[in-house]
Every structure is written in structure tokens, then in C-alpha cells.
């Protein structure tokens, strides 16, 4: 890492939660490495072993943890453990970037959470936003960045980007084009939230 990629004083401390390949996380790390980003990634947490996201974090020297639901007696215990693990790193904000679990009340009481979703909410919430939009036959879909509340993809919308559905699109081709927009949106949203902290 060069000196120019060091986060400036007052950089927004982000904890990023992942379940999969972590390309949205990578966009945040790349923005930090490019220099001048008003945020830093202080920890990456996953809900399963062996995620690409955790690998990306480790390659970059970012601390990681895994917090798996099946390792706890109850969902509430998992939520409490996740809240503790996050709090150890004193994040200003948690980013749910492809984290495929609904966060519980302890996590949400401790810190504000931003989620990125691969559809234009309130349409197609849940774990299969791209598949559901494609199955419905929409001609335009996209991605949404929103605050997380106690519902599933119901919190206040921060930003959205539209993506056209092309003839012959598959789940994979459409999701990949959405993710190109999603990664840009996420970096821009966090840059904005770092500059205007009235949400705190
Ligand atoms: C992203 O498209 C994100 O919106 C989606 O998972 C993908 C993760 O990609 N999340 C959801 O569907 C949550 N409901 P990534 O691991 O490459 O960042």
C-alpha cells in the first residue's frame, strides 16, 4: 500500500458483511487504494466459511471474522454474537454487501446498516431479486442502496440505478450488468454518507 492510499483522518469506519464473492467489497477496497476515499474498511464479516469476500479482505490485510448461524443455539444468540464482533472494531457504519442473512435487533440497535440489493425496491425484495425480476418479465430493473430496518429490504432508499433487461438475458448476464452499476453506486453512496453525517 502506498502512502496515498492511507485513509485520511476522520475517514468513515466501515464494517462490511459478505456471504459470497465480494465484488462490492472489492469496489470499496479499490476506492480506498486509489486514494482519497473518505472511508476505510476496518473489518469484513461473513456468515459462512470460505467466501471470496473474506479472501479479498485477507489479501488486503483487512481483519476478518466468520459468524455462522448453526454455531449458535438460537438466531438471537447469533445476532448477539455478530453485534459483539462488529462492536470490537468500532465501525461508524455496517455495509451489508451480498450478506444473505436478515440482521437481528441487537445488531441494528448498535450501529446503522446500509444494504445493497440487486433490484429496484420496493419491487423484488428478498434473496432472489434478479431471478424474480427476470421471471416477472420487467424490461428495466437495477439496484438499490437502502438503510436496513427490521423488515426484509424495506428500509428508506438512499440511491438506485436502473439497468435495462436485454433480450436473451440470463440470470447471470443480467446480474453481472446490475453489479457493474451496483459497485459504482455503493462507492458513491458511501462517499456521500461520509461527507454528510447527518444520519448519525
Ligand atoms: C449483489 O448483487 C448484492 O446486491 C446481492 O448479492 C450480490 C453480491 O455480490 N445481495 C442480495 O441479493 C441480498 N438480497 P458480491 O458478493 O459480488 O458483492
Image (tube, grey):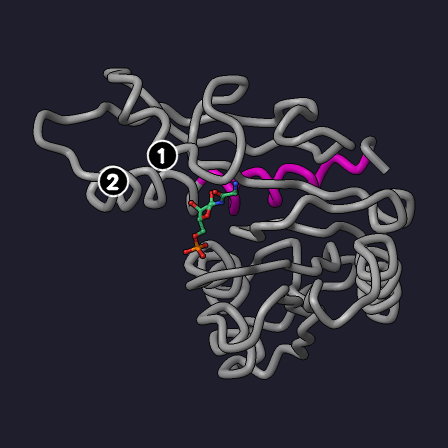
Q: Does residue 47 show up?
A: yes
SS under mark 2: helix
Q: Residue furthest front?
A: 73
- Residue 49: x percent and y percent? 56, 76
Q: Nearer the viewer, residue 36 or 50?
A: 50
Residue position for label 1? 130
Q: Nearer the viewer, residue 145 or 109?
A: 109
Q: CA distance from mark 2 to mark 1?
A: 7 Å
Relative placement, left or right, of 177 versus 45 is left
Asked if residue 67 lies in the magenta stretch, the reply is no
Label 2 crowd bin: few (<14), some (14–19), many (20+), radius 10 Å: some
Query: Which residue lies at the image location 66% right of the left edge and 67% below the top edge?
Result: 45
Q: Bin the neighbour count of mark 1 within 10 Å (Cα to Cα): few under 14, some 14-19, many 20 and up.
A: many
* Sequence-earlier tag: 2 or 1: 1
Q: Chief secondary structure of the magenta span?
A: helix
Say if mark 2 contacts mark 1, CB within 8 Å. Answer: yes
- Label 1's element? helix
Give me the disc on residue 29: none
- Residue in the picture at 46% in, 54% down: 24
Percent of width and height locating residue 95:
65, 50
Residue marked by disc 2: 171
Can you say whether 92 is above or below 173 in the image? below
Depth check: 109 or 36 in front? Answer: 109
Q: Residue 14, how many percent across, how many down?
A: 70, 58
User: Which segment is the magenta one?
Assistant: 185-197
Q: Quadrant of residue 177?
A: top left
Task: Tell me: is circle 2 under 8 Å from ligand 1.
Answer: no
17 sits to left or right of 78: left
Q: Does mark 1's beta carbon lie closer than 8 Å to ligand 1?
A: yes
Relative to 51, does residue 187 appear above or below in the rendering? Answer: above
Classify the position of the C terminus by image quarter: top right
Amino acid at each position: 500500500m502506498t502512502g496515498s492510499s492511507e485513509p485520511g483522518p476522520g475517514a468513515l469506519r466501515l464494517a462490511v458483511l459478505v456471504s459470497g464473492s465480494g465484488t462490492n467489497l472489492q469496489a470499496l477496497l479499490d476506492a480506498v487504494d486509489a486514494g482519497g476515499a473518505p472511508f476505510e474498511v476496518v473489518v469484513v464479516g461473513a456468515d459462512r466459511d470460505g467466501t471470496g469476500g473474506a479472501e479479498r479482505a485477507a489479501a488486503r490485510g483487512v481483519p476478518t471474522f466468520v459468524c455462522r448461524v448453526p454455531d449458535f443455539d438460537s438466531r438471537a444468540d447469533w445476532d448477539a454474537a455478530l453485534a459483539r464482533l462488529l462492536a470490537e472494531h468500532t465501525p461508524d457504519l455496517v455495509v451489508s454487501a451480498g450478506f444473505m442473512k436478515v440482521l437481528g435487533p441487537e445488531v441494528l440497535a448498535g450501529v446503522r446498516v446500509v444494504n445493497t440489493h440487486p433490484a429496484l425496491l420496493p419491487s423484488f425484495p428478498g434473496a432472489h431479486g434478479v431471478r424474480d425480476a427476470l421471471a416477472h418479465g420487467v424490461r428495466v430493473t437495477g439496484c438499490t442502496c437502502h438503510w436496513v430496518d427490521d423488515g426484509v429490504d424495506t428500509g428508506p432508499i438512499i440511491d438506485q440505478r436502473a439497468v435495462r433487461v436485454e433480450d436473451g438475458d440470463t440470470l447471470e448476464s443480467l446480474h453481472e450488468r446490475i453489479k457493474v452499476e451496483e459497485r459504482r453506486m455503493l462507492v458513491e453512496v458511501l462517499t456521500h454518507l461520509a461527507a454528510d453525517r447527518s444520519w448519525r
